């Protein structure tokens, strides 16, 4: 566990942020090198990446806030008391974290907004960018491992990790845990390879590629949630908030794949 890169006593840089930006910058650089092959202007890659990262920040924070709303209603009196005693702690409770699904929605929104404003073909640009979603996410989950967030269930088997004491998550150090962050990082690496190869050899549309990503990641995330123990993210009966969203994501992915195939079939029929 290494939550901060300490430069001096007054300057500490969050390791998660560093890992995320390494992954994001790497993805943009690789996408720029592939842009010509997919007939995309490299400047559109750069500028759309700015819109997307702004969308990630807004979307990830908003979804985190939404995930906290049910708990606020359940413990409304306690939250009001916290707000009156320490408004900064209350705001940190509301907006102090990030959610991947919120960031994904924000990134997609940023890309759509950019393409509409500057009249860029969203099909070609999205097809180029989609495989790098799990690439960036992989670095983000490694950052989670360093930060000690998104931690796994108590576990004493092979590859178990024991985090040192952390004032932000005191219970984290109580028992050894399953390294679920690294498992998801590995899963995202596999998704990146699958999407990258399929984009090159299968030549799918951007819609099909995004649908495949949503389908594969949604299934993977649903089962990975069984190995996570940070239930303060939200839970409804037996299912975590992320599991419920994962089911919706899988359904949307299947919808994109099916409708994309229908659209392609119609085009072939019309050409004939």
Image (tube, helix red, strand yellow):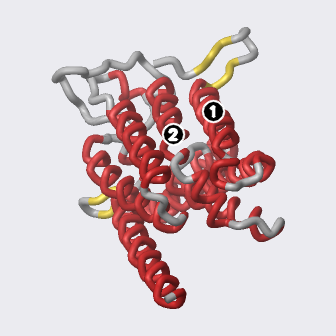
Q: Is residue 60 visible?
A: no
Which is nearer the eye, 97 or 263?
263
In percent of width and height, residue 193 lies at: 42, 41
In percent of width and height, residue 177 lies at: 28, 27
Above or below, 34 relative to 64: above
Above or below, 182 relative to 36: above
In the rendered structure, the answer to whether residue 34 lies left or right of residue 135 reads right
| Label drawn at residue 100 | none
Which is nearer the eye, 70 or 257?
257
Q: Which residue is mark 1?
A: 26
Instruction: Determine crowd level at label 2: few under 14, some 14-19, many 20+ residues with C-alpha closer than 10 A.
Output: many
Looking at the image, which residue is at 42% across and 18% down?
165
Reading the chain from its start, which is encountered first: label 1 or label 2? 1
Above or below, 120 relative to 200: below
Instruction: Determine crowd level at label 1: few under 14, some 14-19, many 20+ residues with C-alpha closer than 10 A.
Output: some
Which is nearer the eye, 108 or 45?
45
Mark 1 touching mark 2, by CB under 8 A? yes
Looking at the image, which residue is at 47% across and 29% down?
142
Q: Which residue is mark 2?
A: 135
In percent of width and height, residue 118 lies at: 83, 65
């Amino acid at each position: 566990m290494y939550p901060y890169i300490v430069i001096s006593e007054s300057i500490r840089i969050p390791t998660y942020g560093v890992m995320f930006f390494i992954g994001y910058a790497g993805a943009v650089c690789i996408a720029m090198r592939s842009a010509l092959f997919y007939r995309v202007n490299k400047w559109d890659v750069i500028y759309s990446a700015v819109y997307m990262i702004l969308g990630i920040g807004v979307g990830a924070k908003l979804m985190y806030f939404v995930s906290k709303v049910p708990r606020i209603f359940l413990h409304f009196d306690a939250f009001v008391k916290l707000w009156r005693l320490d408004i900064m702690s209350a705001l940190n409770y509301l907006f102090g974290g990030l959610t991947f699904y919120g960031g994904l929605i924000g990134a997609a929104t940023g890309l759509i907004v950019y393409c509409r404003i500057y009249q860029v073909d969203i099909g070609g640009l999205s097809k180029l960018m989609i495989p790098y979603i799990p690439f960036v996410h992989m670095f983000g989950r490694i950052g989670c491992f360093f930060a000690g967030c998104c931690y796994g269930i108590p576990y004493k088997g092979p590859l178990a990790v024991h985090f040192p004491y952390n004032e932000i998550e005191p219970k984290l150090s109580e028992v050894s845990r399953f390294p679920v962050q690294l498992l998801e990082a590995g899963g995202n690496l596999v998704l990146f390879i699958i999407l990258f190869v399929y984009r090159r050899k299968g030549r799918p549309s951007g819609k099909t590629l995004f649908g495949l990503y949503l389908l594969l990641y949604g299934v993977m995330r649903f089962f990975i949630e069984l190995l996570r123990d940070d239930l303060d993210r939200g839970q409804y009966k037996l299912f975590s908030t992320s599991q419920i969203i994962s089911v919706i994501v899988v359904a949307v992915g299947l919808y994109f794949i099916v409708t994309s195939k229908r659209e392609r079939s119609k085009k072939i029929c019309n050409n004939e």
